[in-house]
Image: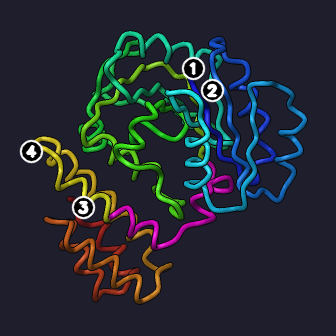
Amino acid sequence: MFTVVIPLYNKEAFIEKAVNSVLKQTFKDFELIVVNDGSTDNSLDILQSLQDKRLKVISIPNQGVSVARNTGIRCARNDWICFLDADDWWECEFLETLNMTISLYPTNKIFGTGFSRIFPNESERYHHAILPAEGKCSIINYFEVIGSYYPPPINSSNIVIHKTLFELYGFFKPGQNNYEDHDLWLRLCVSERIVFCNKALSNYRKTEVNSASSAYYSANDFILYINTIKEVASKLNTSNKIYFRRYYNKFTLLVYIKNYSRYTNQQNLEVCRLLLSLLDGWSKFILRLLCWLPYKNVYVLLKKIKP
């Protein structure tokens, strides 16, 4: 039924909890593939101490999270692919709930559950007015959700995708370590709706120290994502274009402002060129200011401007 793919790179403090949360699922028809992406800590030793015939470990040279996930997908024996990051974990009914939901929506191919974001000192239940009521399931429009609220309703630890969609819309982009999941969700959701079961069954850890994207951030990741945004925007119907425009006008500008000082001059030129061809309204105006005002002055100005 399910293949669970866990990409692993130096998560010795968390990997045992992640793996055990899969092995303890009440629904038993699954295989678990952990792709060890060249870990240099004790992660692999911990994995080897966990004895279960459903657990398969594949070790590859370090190539990043996208390649690790793609490796797991291509090795999967089952039709439904679940992702779980190595520092996250599931509640024991995660797969059972998804199995029942799939039986209720047999023509759909993307499913997600409610989740909690786990911070160092607190947890936060993901919620949104557009989502189904607590404990209920329904079909949602990904672009409508992200158009009014960020983060998205799906992440790399609460989503299940039918394997055929990767052949249709592409895999994770090799070499992309930041926005790689958002990039794929956009491509999938141009033509596919998400069935969302609003039960808090996934726990998504949010700490800077454990964030692979923080460690591997590069301007190229952002450039790849902007190009996907432009490609997806050209394919959407009118209503979804409106939702999507709200999202990328805000999100891409904020990402650029946050990382502006980390780019080389050449990277700044390339990112600005792409964003100027994408953004409009206040977002485009603010971006143009960034071309000639000192960064700290733009930050002060942004605090005064209401979009």
Q: Which mark is residue 238?
A: 4
Mark 1 residue element: helix
* Tags 4 and 2 touching, CB below 8 Å: no
Earlier residue among tags 4 and 3: 3
- Which residue shows up at 21% across the image and 66% down it? 278
Q: Is residue 121 visible?
A: no
Left or right: 83, with 209 as reference point: left
Circle 2: residue type: Trp
Residue 135 part of the magenta-drawn span: no
Magenta part, dominant SS: helix
Question: What is the C-alpha distance between the residues marked 1 and 2?
Answer: 6 Å
> Badges 1 and 2: C-beta atoms under 8 Å apart?
yes
How far is the residue under mark 4 from the one under mark 1?
Answer: 35 Å
Name the amino acid, label 1: Phe
Which one is nearer the viewer's eye here, 59 or 181?
59
Residue denoted by label 2: 90
How dense is the environment of label 4, judged by Cα within 10 Å: few (below 14), some, or many (20 and up)?
few
Q: Which residue is mark 1?
A: 94
Q: Which amino acid type is shown beneath numbered disc 4?
A: Thr
Q: Is residue 20 above or below residue 279?
A: above
Amino acid type indicated by mark 3 = Lys
Magenta segment, which residues? 207-226
Residue at 34 percent of width and 76 percent of height: 271
